[in-house]
Image: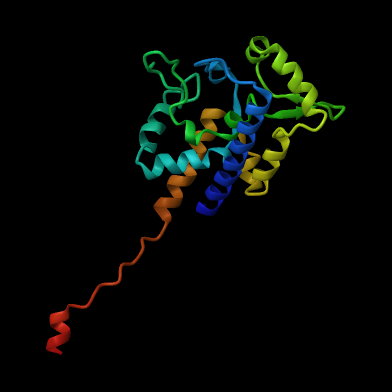
Amino acid sequence: MLDKIRKVERVFKQLDKETEKFGKESKLRCLTNCNLCCFKKGLEANVLEFLPLANYLVKNNLHEAALDLLDTNPEHCINLAKTQVPGQTAGCSIYDHRGLICRLFGFSAVRDKNAKLAVYTCSHMKNEFPAEYKLAMERINSGMNIPIVADFYYQIYFIDSSMANDYNPINVSIRKAIEKVAYYYACKPAKKVKAKANPQEEKDE
């Protein structure tokens, strides 16, 4: 289990580098304090992409509270912060451990039926930065590097095809990931600590 988590985290690390580079080169960026994509209904994700989140929650004893929150059947992702920091919009409360779907959106590309690339982003970004968006669309089809959505899903597919194919509403996948990781730790044998010999006993012998 831990090996799979580390492999997913390595994919995430590489993706973050590529999306950051694309953002700088294209000059595309999210609207200030925007979290509208988090409020989109019907979001689905696979179980595998939330193993790193589940591992973080379990290791920090936060998973029981997360499961309790999931039991309330929240309308949106449980990681969407409900409290607003002054001057900021409430957003992801576990940004560093967000899933693949969250990392890809806005700064990656999908292919159409003619194999032409299109930036995988929202209408708000397109409307706010029309010139940058138009130029990015032209450049990604003439050699500009951009992460491809399908490529990264293929990468995690080969880590564990079963969990990568297990798509559900986002909160269902988070629950399944937590349950798998919690079960792993519950069944993991405790490390045996070798008792040190008592120096006095050794001397007496």
Left or right? Give the position of 195 relative to 204. right
What is the residue that sits farthest to the right in this orientation? 114
Compared with 97, 188 (above or below) is below
The residue nearer to you, when weighing 186 against 17, is: 17
Which residue does the image show at 76% across and 19% down from the upper left? 135
Which residue does the image show at 36% across and 36% down from the upper left? 64
Compared with 6, 18 (above or below) is above
What is the residue that sits farthest to the bottom in this orientation? 205
Compared with 127, 5 (above or below) is below
Which residue does the image show at 49% across and 45% down from the upper left? 180
Q: Quadrant of the C terminus?
A: bottom left
Image location (x, y in percent) of residue 122: 65, 17
Determine the image quadrant of residue 152: top right
Tell me which colouring the rendered structure shows.
rainbow
State the count of labels. 0
Determine the image quadrant of residue 162: top right
Image location (x, y in percent) of residue 11: 61, 44
What is the residue that sits farthest to the top in this orientation? 127
Left or right? Give the position of 108 relative to 36. right
Left or right? Give the position of 113 relative to 1. right
The residue nearer to you, when weighing 124 against 66, is: 124
The residue nearer to you, when weighing 191 against 123, is: 123
Which residue does the image show at 50% across and 52% down from the upper left? 2
Image location (x, y in percent) of residue 24: 63, 27
Image location (x, y in percent) of residue 68: 38, 30
